[in-house]
């Protein structure tokens, strides 16, 4: 009985939790409820992935209305993988949130904080689950609006500006997307993605179709912070509360990349893209983005901002695979989606633990902290190595598939860019590690600083160990990605 | 131990040092217990390695297959003769270096000794794992762990100089391995569809011979640990580390892991026939030959003893690289044997350098005049090891040079033969004067060494053993010769 409604429950349970949490008294209760819900959703997401992992597609009709009139949730390996990322990250972030939120968010806002978190969670899950493009827009707005509120709760006043900046950019992005969806509806008379993909091939030549495509692409490029539309991201990541940075960095951009995949491969079909210069534009933006943002990251003085610029560069890697449009390329994109969530999650959590102890994320203030917080330091080292792509970590698997995809296309320029990007990552990761590792000139700078509390360390280390595990066993990541690619790129071997 | 299965022996050999690292950290506050753990582990590893050697020599190929990472790529180990040779050198010398390190670290009153011993154990485990690797992926994995685990050792002192050296060390080693080696591995994988080591290579017939040279170059330069110019700077930079690190890691384990990887790639990825028929090494040879000569010349200009030894190592490593690139049977045997012969001699030289530092607090050669009379044992060992590096009988170093030279003759590369000969002359010029001046010159200025005594006994003991080994290997080079020729001939 419940099994049949799994796809819906994944979205509805957190949605219903949000108002309940909002009316709960401040204190630990809202946290407890949210955490339990996130565990339940994670369990459901795992079940869902098992159900579709073998190549099945689940179609769920909302309220019993048959598509294309009713809303359809359509789950294949690609959705299920992304939903698993979102649910998994939420399930480790929420336990972590308890201490971090107590420190960073005023008590009277805490139940609202968790309520907004649940809404954001709902929105991101909804985007991955739905098979209806207008419904997708609705979930996009749910997640975006709650994200603006969450970012503005940051401790510094700049958080407000950062949230405002994201609000403006995010709204432009969402509006573009809506315009695109509207045009598509005008052309085809349907909003169901499966239906769209059946009707669009006949309308490829139409200028309206092409315009719709352009609007959707630009709209989501803004959401996923594809260079050069990334300007909102560094501020948002830097000034948001630590927990929100972890959650956004590990999930929000991933979901946006998933939508890109869905729209390009399912709705329009890659042959459509190949006739337009889209894939070339993607490759160009990605290469410039990877190089430039990695260099930017090197020069940052704030650890969160450093990792934020690194994220923009990493988004470039994900979109590269998509730009190739090959089986290997899209596999690389999906694998990196998953792996990057693990590494950035772990890194931002470790930084959050440092912020929890010393109240600052500036790199200068961290000199010699490695001695006082050895476990946090070790987490940053392993997370950093994964970001670089050292063998034995998840990041290596991503690099492996990406470079293979580029070699397959004989695109040596991009091979070079990926490898140079890794070398730049060595520089910025080591900047962080070196500062933490060597003791500072001022011997008493961190007197009395202790290791972070266990409730911060355990979630961090779950992600750290996941980084190693998925670097050595790729059955889940690569296996699922290959299943997903079969459905996204039918007929291509 | 004799009836233990080979599989379990591999597991133990690789796992024991890692367990030791954890125990060392736990016994931070009790130095004697901590050092006992190091010694016991190093002793057991040496025993295990020797036992494995006996099995390999009897024709067995111990294997350990762990798990699959990516479809078609597994983490697995199998001990073929070449890997056994490298493991035998690294495993036995770890025990001797541990004895030395205890005398050195205590005599020199180093800080953070716990971190030192722990990182050392991890480094040895990864070097042994590299030696046992059954495919290029596993080897690459161990290669990178080796780089990372030695970083805390290189930057041990924590000074600004150490940090800068650490950056050069990591920058070059990680940079070349990700920029070139990983790319080479990926191209190999996409062309051959496998990364398994196979005698005779996996590329022949699959890779267009026109590109063989490019791919080979990516490997040679991507294996930065082999220190072929222009990617050699990390090795002199690493000399900022405590002397036991320079001795075991930067004369034996790390650098030999580099040239070992090159030999593996030559014999088991390309295959010598393919290299020769495709002319893959035609122009690479000159990079290695230049390194041999140039590094010797630079060594002459260095007054700091460890810096001079470092450049000498750069030069000697390229002997091995050159032997691999010539790719004849004799040259490969010579190159493989040189892994062992150079190891015993160079580690003795570094042991002596450390002894001088601990006992007399001298680092510069120009200040060592007359020191030989105060430290006769140390300088006697230094002289013998120098002669072995030069390649004179009755010392082990002669054999590897002999086969390397024979290799050039078989390949009719007369210019390369000249390179080896000139380099031997240069070795004489930069090594022998150190000992000669120490014995026969008067101390410079108004210094006298009446206060200076020999270094603590663990240092002398370690140095004595390796010196004896240099001599023994002249009379009895068989273990290393047998392994080398088994590896090259493939049976």
Image (tube, rainbow, N blue to C red):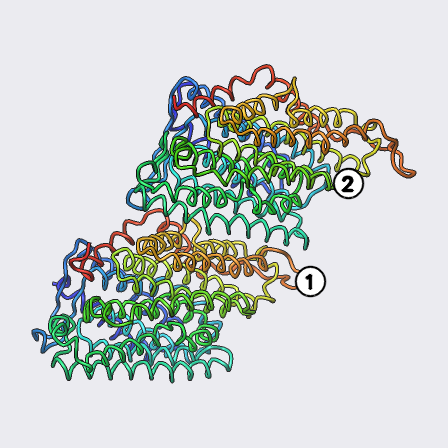
Can you say whether B487 is above or below A300 in the image? above
Where is residue A94 shown, x and y percent of the image? Answer: 37, 66
Q: Is B413 placed left or right of B452 in the picture?
A: left
User: From this viewpoint, which residue is outermost toward the top?
Assistant: B475
- Label 1 chain ID: A
Q: Residue at x 45, y 41 (%)?
A: B142
**Location of residue B102 (image quadrant):** top right
Q: Residue at x 42, y 62 (%)?
A: A344
Q: Is A160 placed left or right of B234 in the picture?
A: left
Quarter placement of the N terminus of chain B? top left
Q: Is B79 placed left or right of B362 in the picture?
A: left
Residue A119's mark?
none
**Residue B44 visible within the image:** no
Where is residue A86 shown, x and y percent of the image? Answer: 31, 65
Mark 1 and mark 2, same subunit? no
Residue A450 vs residue A301, the one in the foreground: A301
Q: Is B458 placed left or right of B52 in the picture?
A: right
Where is residue A17 shown, x and y percent of the image? Answer: 27, 74
Quarter placement of the C terminus of chain B? top left
Q: Which residue is mark 1?
A: A442
**Location of residue B299 (image quadrant):** top right
Instruction: Select label 1 or label 2 by which is in front.
Output: 2
Quick one: SS at disc 1? loop
Q: CA distance from mark 1 to mark 2?
A: 33 Å
Quick one: SS at disc 2? loop
Q: Which residue is mark 2?
A: B364
Where is residue B412 shown, x and y percent of the image? Answer: 51, 27
Confirm or deny contact between disc 1 and disc 2 (CB under 8 A).
no
Can you say whether B209 is above or below A489 in the image? above
Label 1 Cα neighbours within 10 Å, binned few <14 / some 14-19 / many ≥20 = few
């Amino acid at each position: 009985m419940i099994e049949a409604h799994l796809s819906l429950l994944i979205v509805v349970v957190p949605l219903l939790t949000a108002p309940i949490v909002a009316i709960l008294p401040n204190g630990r209760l809202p946290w407890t409820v949210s955490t339990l819900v996130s565990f339940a959703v994670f369990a459901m997401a795992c079940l869902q992935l098992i159900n579709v992992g073998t190549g099945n597609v689940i179609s769920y009709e909302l309220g019993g209305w048959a598509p294309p009139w009713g809303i359809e949730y359509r789950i294949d390996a690609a959705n299920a993988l992304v939903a698993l990322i979102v649910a998994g990250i939420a399930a480790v972030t929420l336990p972590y949130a308890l201490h971090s939120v107590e420190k960073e968010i005023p008590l009277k806002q805490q139940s609202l904080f968790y309520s907004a978190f649940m809404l954001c969670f709902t929105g991101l899950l909804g985007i991955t689950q739905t098979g209806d493009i207008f419904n997708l827009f609705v979930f996009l707005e749910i997640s975006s609006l709650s994200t603006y509120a969450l970012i503005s709760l940051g401790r510094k006043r700049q958080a407000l500006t950062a949230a405002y900046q994201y609000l403006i950019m995010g709204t432009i992005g969402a509006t573009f997307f809506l315009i695109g969806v509207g045009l598509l509806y005008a052309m085809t008379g349907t909003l169901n993605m499966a239906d769209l993909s059946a009707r669009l091939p006949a309308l490829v030549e139409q200028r309206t179709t092409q315009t719709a495509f352009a609007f959707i692409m630009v709209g989501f490029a803004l959401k996923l912070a594809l260079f050069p539309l990334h300007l909102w991201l560094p501020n948002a990541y830097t000034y948001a509360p630590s927990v929100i940075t972890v959650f956004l960095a590990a999930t929000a951009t991933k979901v946006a990349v998933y939508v890109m995949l869905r729209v390009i491969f399912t709705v329009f079909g890659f042959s459509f893209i190949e006739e337009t210069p889209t894939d070339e534009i993607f490759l160009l933006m990605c290469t410039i983005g990877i190089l430039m943002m990695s260099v930017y990251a090197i020069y940052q003085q704030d650890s969160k901002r450093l990792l934020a610029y690194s994220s923009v560069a990493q988004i470039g890697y994900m979109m590269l695979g998509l730009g190739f449009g090959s089986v290997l390329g899209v596999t690389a994109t999906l694998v990196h989606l998953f792996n990057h969530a693990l590494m950035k999650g772990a890194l931002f959590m470790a930084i959050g633990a440092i912020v929890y102890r010393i109240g600052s994320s500036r790199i200068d203030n961290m000199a010699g902290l490695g001695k006082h917080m050895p476990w946090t330091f070790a987490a940053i080292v392993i997370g950093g190595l994964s970001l670089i792509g050292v063998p034995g970590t998840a990041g290596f698997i991503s690099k492996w598939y990406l470079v293979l995809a580029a070699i397959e296309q004989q695109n040596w320029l991009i091979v070079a860019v990926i490898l140079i990007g890794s070398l730049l990552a060595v520089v910025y990761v080591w900047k962080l590690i070196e500062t933490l590792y060597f003791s500072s000139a001022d011997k008493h700078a961190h007197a009395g600083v202790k290791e972070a509390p266990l409730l911060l360390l355990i979630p961090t280390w779950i992600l750290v160990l996941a980084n190693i595990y998925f670097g050595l066993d790729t059955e889940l990541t690569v296996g699922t990605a290959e299943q997903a690619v079969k459905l996204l790129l039918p007929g291509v071997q | 131990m004799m009836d233990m299965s080979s599989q379990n022996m591999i597991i133990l050999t690789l796992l024991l040092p890692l367990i030791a690292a954890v125990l060392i950290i736990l016994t931070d506050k009790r130095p004697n217990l901590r050092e006992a753990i190091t010694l016991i582990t190093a002793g057991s590893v040496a025993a295990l390695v020797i036992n494995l050697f006996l099995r390999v020599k009897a024709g067995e190929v111990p294997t350990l297959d762990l798990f699959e990472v990516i479809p078609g790529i597994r983490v697995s180990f199998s001990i073929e003769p070449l890997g056994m040779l490298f493991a035998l050198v690294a495993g036995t010398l770890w025990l001797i270096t541990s004895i030395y390190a205890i005398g050195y670290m205590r005599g020199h009153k180093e800080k953070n000794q716990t971190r030192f011993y722990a990182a050392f154990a991890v480094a040895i485990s990864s070097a042994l794992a590299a030696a046992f690797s059954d495919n290029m992926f596993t080897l690459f994995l161990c290669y990178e762990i080796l780089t990372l685990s030695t970083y805390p050792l290189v930057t041990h002192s924590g000074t600004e100089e150490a940090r800068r050296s650490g950056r050069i060390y990591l920058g070059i080693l990680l940079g070349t391995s990700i920029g070139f080696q990983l790319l080479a591995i990926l191209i190999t994988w996409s062309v051959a569809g496998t990364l398994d080591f196979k005698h005779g290579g996996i590329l022949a017939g699959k890779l267009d011979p026109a590109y063989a040279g490019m791919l080979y170059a990516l490997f040679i330069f991507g294996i930065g640990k082999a220190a072929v110019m222009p990617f050699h700077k990390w090795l002199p930079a690493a000399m900022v580390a405590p002397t036991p690190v320079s001795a075991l890691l930067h004369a034996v384990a790390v650098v030999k892991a580099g040239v070992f990887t090159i030999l593996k790639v030559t014999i088991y990825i390309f295959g010598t026939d393919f290299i020769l028929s495709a002319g893959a090494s035609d122009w690479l040879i000159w990079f290695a030959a230049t390194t041999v000569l140039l590094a010797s010349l630079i060594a002459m200009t260095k007054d700091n003893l460890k810096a001079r030894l470092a450049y000498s190592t750069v030069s000697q490593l390229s002997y091995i690289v050159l032997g691999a690139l010539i790719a004849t049977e004799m040259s490969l045997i010579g190159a493989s044997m040189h892994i062992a012969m150079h190891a015993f001699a160079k580690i003795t030289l570094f042991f002596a350098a450390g002894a001088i530092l601990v006992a007399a607090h001298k680092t510069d050669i120009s200040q060592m005049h007359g020191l030989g009379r105060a430290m006769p044992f140390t300088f006697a060992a230094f002289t013998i090891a120098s002669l072995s590096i030069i390649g004179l009988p009755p010392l082990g170093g002669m054999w590897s040079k002999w086969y390397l030279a024979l290799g050039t003759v078989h390949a009719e590369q007369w210019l390369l033969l000249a390179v080896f000969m000139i380099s031997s002359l240069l070795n004489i010029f930069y090594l022998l004067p150190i000992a000669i001046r120490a014995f026969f010159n008067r101390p410079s200025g108004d210094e006298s060494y009446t206060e200076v005594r020999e270094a603590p006994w663990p240092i002398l003991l370690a140095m004595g053993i390796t010196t004896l080994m240099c001599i023994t290997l002249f009379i009895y080079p068989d273990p290393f010769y047998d392994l080398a020729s088994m590896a090259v001939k493939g049976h």
